[in-house]
Amino acid sequence: MISFELPLRAIDKFMGHQPLVDAGHALARVLWQAFALTGAELEVVGLEHVDPDQRYVIVANHQGFSDVIVIAKVLRALQPRYVAKRELARGWPSISYLIEASGSAIIDRKQPTAAIAEIERLGHQAKREGWSVAIFPEGTRAKDGVPGRWKARGTKALLDTAGPCPVLPVSLSGGSELFAHNGLPFKAGVRMGCHIHPPVEPPAADEDFGVWLEGVRQVVASALAQ
């Protein structure tokens, strides 16, 4: 992936932001092919629920590094930005550069106040630019694939600033197994899934946000239990 970074920087400098985003989604498809060479297969369900002309806040469970690749591949028509941990933005050549340069929010979980400010910055920019945004409310990937507790504060900050727009729940599976070795080598022959649920409306002003978010978490978890 290191070999892609210089061309990406050149695209960003000489051609502009949108060509860089287009190149990033093309790179995601290339990286998926690397997964496929190990025998990985991806089943996609529910793509009919996505309107390519609508922007969304995409809310998904967290499986690992593959999450960004799968969402970028499956939801390429939306060209979403991401709320990403600092580790992802620093540790993966090319992908790290793309995440940062595309305008995604890079957060440090050890600095919660700064993290919320960065999420709000992304939300305001997404609303202004018409972007979709993906967030993983677990924060930390589920090593066993079972969704953990979702954190409300960052998701609420994103919805408050990026909205009003529909929320698109997405269930991701197989990523934790693919990265069973915490990186390379990928585990061979993994069956992965991306289940897109019907969009839901963001919570009303007088609605308990924690209760609403738990309802979305249960929708996401329902597809993982099948």
Image (spheres, rainbow, N blue to C red):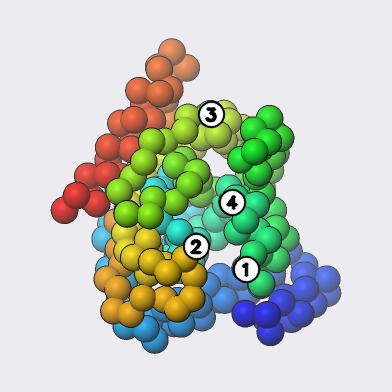
Q: In this view, does 174 lie above or below 51?
A: below
Q: Which of 127 and 157 is in front in this view?
A: 157
Residue ID at (65%, 44%): 107
Q: Which residue is drawn at 54% across and 55% down?
A: 80
The quadrant the N terminus occupies is: bottom right
Which residue ends up furthest to the right in the rendered image? 14
Q: In this view, does 97 lie to the left or right of 196?
A: right
To which residue does mark 3 refer?
Answer: 153
Q: Is there any visible trace of residue 21 in the rendered image?
A: no
Tags 2 and 1 touching, CB below 8 Å: yes
- Left of 39 or right of it: where is 28? right
**Separation of marks 1 and 3 at Cα, in angstroms:** 27 Å
- Of badges 1 and 3, the one in the foreground is 1
Q: Nearer the viewer, mark 1 or mark 4?
A: 1
For the residue marked with disc 1, what is the amino acid? Answer: Trp
Query: In the rendered image of this protein, does residue 101 appear above or below residue 73?
Result: above
Q: Which disc is residue 84 wearing?
A: 4
Amino acid at pointer 4: Ala
Q: Distance between the residues labelled 2 and 1?
A: 9 Å
